[in-house]
Amino acid sequence: MFVAFASIHEAKATEAVAGRYVPGAFAGPGAGIVPPTPGVAYWAVSNVYYHGEASGQIPFGNGSVAVGMSGDVWATVLAGIYVPPLHLPGTWTYAVEVAVPIGWTGAKAQVGPFGVDQQVAALGDIAFAPVVLGWHNDAMNTWLSASLTITAPTGEWKEGDLAFIGLNYWTFSPAIGFTYLIPEHGLDLSAKFGVDINTKNPDTDYYSGAMAHLDLSVTKNITEALSVGAIAGFLDQIEDDRGTFADSHNGFRGHSIAVGPLVKYKAKFGESTEVDLTLRWAHELEVENRMKGDAIFFDIAGKF
């Protein structure tokens, strides 16, 4: 299971109501597991679709403000994690991870007296996790992880545009994960907590405040191959935005709560090849200073 990956922007508070975290993005079985086998590479293809709407004012840097925005985001994130053959003490594991998103965004809003409708498809902001640490107990039913993900502003972005793929600033995301397995009942209880710490957008001079997010999941094995469960995602902006618009809107902090179902299927090809297919839906129930909508995730993961 991957403990860190990149996600392209999804509407919430911060500049252009966009940030890197999609509610429920890290929710799922094994969220705290770092693969324990040295010398093995793992891969994942994560597909994300989000639709949301907002009726209030939306800042685009310090100069432009849009009203009544609706947006659609589709992204495919190609991720890989490698466990180097290191001999760490006890049951510790070290890994590195990289994620490359390719996405499409469509957005509509009222800007001044004009209605604006834009679309863009391009490379997103690439993320790299140079530190992914994992630990498990001897019974291998309790797993912990700690990671640091660095996301670079490599994606398509243009000042004043409603639709964009990148965010034009760096983000540093420390995170911790936890998984507890109850094999006799086929249960997986997992949690992932992280904080996104951003740099200032150098072209708009707008600073998007730090975001804390928590993802939870409960998964039950129905058969050897099929599992079902529930997920929840919580977002809370713990730091004010800074800019002309944010300063006049009490820091423009965003909040969100999302819940939804999960289905996982383990497909076998031959005697040694397994691919995990996971489908999740996160529906936002309560939001503040951000768009409100739904996110659908479809993940395909395996190992070399």
Image (tube, rainbow, N blue to C red):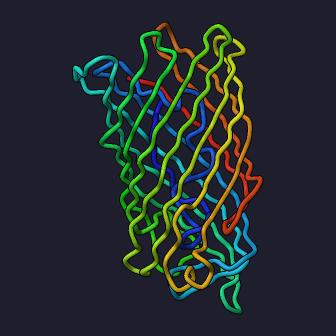
Residue 260 position (above or below residue 54): above
Q: How many marks?
A: 0
**Percent position (x, y) of residue 143?**
47, 24
Q: Is residue 294 above or below residue 147?
A: below
Give the left or right position of residue 262, taking residue 102 as reference: right
The residue positioned 42% from the left and 24% from the top of the image is 303
The picture places residue 269, in percent across and down from the top left corner, at 53, 15
Q: Is residue 57 left or right of residue 98?
A: right
**Residue 82 found in image quarter:** top left
- Residue found at x 73% / y 57%: 293
Image: 283 above or below 274: below
What residue occupies the far bottom of the structure in this picture? 113
* Depth check, front residue: 94 or 7: 94
For the C terminus, give its image quadrant.
top left
Residue at screen point 39% across, 40% down: 147
> In the rendering, at what x and y percent does residue 244 appear?
52, 86
Q: Vertical placement of 271 versus 256: above or below? A: above
65 sits to left or right of 45: right
- x then y, percent, for residue 8: 51, 56
Image-based side of 224 in relation to 156, left or right: right
